[in-house]
Amino acid sequence: MKAQVLNSETGPGGLALTDVDDPTPADGQVLVDIKSCGVCFPDLLMSQGKYQLRLPTPFTPGTEVAGVVAEAPEGSGYAVGDRVLVMSVVGGFAEKVAAAPAQLLPIPEGLTFDEGAALGINFQTALFALQTRAHLQPGETVGVLGSAGGVGVATIAVAKALGARVIAIVHRNGAEEMLRATGADEVVSLTDGWGDRVKELTGGAGVDVLIDPVGGEVFDEALRQVATDGRFVVIGFAAGGIPQVKLNRVLFRNIAVVGAAWGEYLRTHPNLPTELHEQLTTMIADGMRPPVNRTYPLAELPQALSDLENGQILGKAVIHIAD
């Protein structure tokens, strides 16, 4: 089969499209023919050797798989021909992958394989952050930093499905139309005075929930935009810098700063993906769709990761592997 193999932790340039042996499923594993695989920030970090999970090279990255079951052992809960998502951790940028049944979820009815790959980790993370960690209530206002990225568009879509008003906060030009199509009620450009604009849109109160996958320099100003009794949810540090929290602001303004590390949470809550997936499936049945904003063939994965690194992808990109 064809696979993108990372031969050195030198970034996207360390990948090479290679002929490799088909995976042989271990006892109890399911073999999946891959149709699409999402492109996400952990894939980029893994190519650079900066992700918390580091594997010896060579290996094939790829974490957000959508495909069709090719082989399934009795008792796995899956059958040949089933359309599935695979939380593969690695191995997704290839034509086949073997995984344990616990790593599989059914693709919601009506989604394409590209949409299934876009559903992946980002939508799980968004629902986990908004509901499990922030306890979002219908009618509350959500601010989304980094809203033009994969986690950002997923958060907008999920927040709208949960009945929230959404303010998308974005630093990239040309994203407003996409963000509004995804569900944003308001779009605020991350320029001087952006915090004043958020306050204006919220009648001076600020947002009830602020989702931050970015970190870095905007943190202090973002914290000021959280309303009394509000929740500032830290998802990651895409900007590279890990900010320091000034606890006097947390104390005297009666706000909460909470973490939302989906992958770490699974260590103690292994049933979480299934529970979240059931809710996401209901949202999809009610009309929500994971946006696919750009697709690449498998041979162009290094370019896709480079584009992600350089901020040239608005929304979610997917590697389309087979029809």
Image: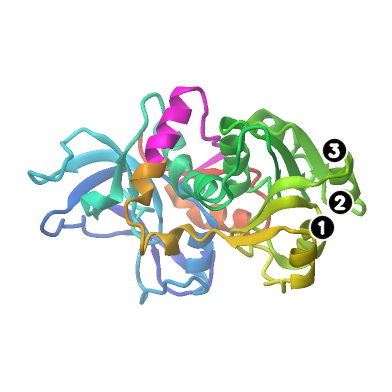
Where residue 121 appears, x then y in whole percent?
Answer: 46, 50
Residue 130, horizontal then vertical, whole percent: 57, 46
Give the amino acid type for the residue marked by disc 1 in the picture: Arg
Residue 135 or 293: which is nearer the viewer? 135
Q: Which residue is mark 2?
A: 195
Question: Which region is colored magenta?
Answer: 277-297
Front residue of 93/30: it is 30
> Along the horizontal axis of the image, is 274 left or right of 38?
left
* Position above or below: 313 against 78: below
Residue assigned mark 3: 201
Residue 20 in the image: above or below residue 163: below
State the residue in front, 39 or 108. Answer: 108
Residue 279 higher or lower than 237, as above or below: above
Colouring chosen for the image of the structure? rainbow
Residue 228 shows in this picture: yes
Instruction: Look at discs 1 and 2 and give the one toward the viewer.
Output: 1
Q: Looking at the image, how many numbered discs can be counted on the residues?
A: 3
Answer left or right for 182 relative to 110. Answer: right
Q: Which residue is mark 1?
A: 224
- Asked if 213 appears above or below 162 in the picture, the reply is below
Q: Circle 1 sits in a helix, a strand or a loop, which is it?
A: loop
Crowding at mark 2 (Cα within 10 Å: few <14, some 14-19, many 20+): many
Residue drawn at (17%, 53%) of the image = 29
Identify the element where label 2 is drawn: helix
